[in-house]
Image: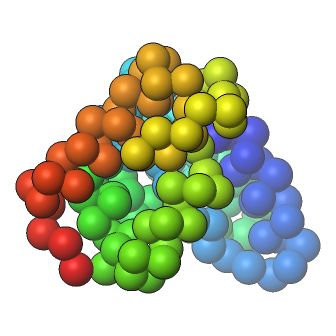
Amino acid sequence: NLLFLCYAGALAYKAGARTLVTGVSQTDYSGYPDCRENTMAAMEKALSLGMEVPLTIETPLMHLSKAETWALAEKTGGRKLVDFILERTHTCYLGERGMRHAWGYGCGECPACVLRRQGWEEYAAGACAHA
């Protein structure tokens, strides 16, 4: 995530943009420190100092569970967006794209897949208010 933000910061600087948006969440992450709010604040400061312009890092998913993130996707773009996410994205740490589950692609066993599956199941069961 930090490498992606460095690259995005350089592109933003060149384009004159001052806001970066990332989908990190510390609510139910698998232990990686680059998903935490304090890491994002430090990265925002480092990029701003390094680029000598104020850059902001927005983290709209920071305090949402995976189930709440699915519900937000539905609220934002309807079932079409949810289907797009299921078919076109994955969070598998092994990069597995051969196995399609109800919650999308992935190995099904790494921490990222387990979190995505659990979030999907909670969302699909209606535990989160659908749009």
Residue drawn at 62 percent across, 73 percent down: 19
Residue positioned 39% across, 70% down in the render: 73
| Residue 31: percent from left, percent from top | 40, 22
Q: Is 51 on the left or on the right of 22, as rendered?
A: right
- Please state, as top left, top right, bottom left or bottom right, where the N terminus lies in the image: top right
Left-right relation of 15 to 86: right
Residue 117 position (above or below residue 52):
above
Front residue of 89 and 38: 89
Pick out the residue farthest to the right: 14
Report the front residue among 121 and 94: 121
Please tell me in which quadrant of the rendered image residue 90 appears: top right
In the rendered view, tell whether residue 126 sits above or below residue 75: above
Q: Residue at x 65, y 22 (%)?
A: 94
Query: Which quarter of the picture shows residue 82?
Result: bottom left
Left or right of 11 in this view: 63: left
The colour scheme applied to this rendered structure is: rainbow
Residue 115 is situated, as x and y percent measured from the top left of the image, at 35, 33
Residue 24 to residue 108: above or below: below
Assign the C terminus to one quadrant of the image: bottom left
Residue 99, visible in the rendered structure:
yes
Q: With 19 as the anchor, is 81 left or right in this view? A: left
- Residue 40, percent across and down? 50, 47
User: x and y percent of residue 92 in the render?
Assistant: 57, 31
What's the residue at 74%, 39% (across, down)? 3
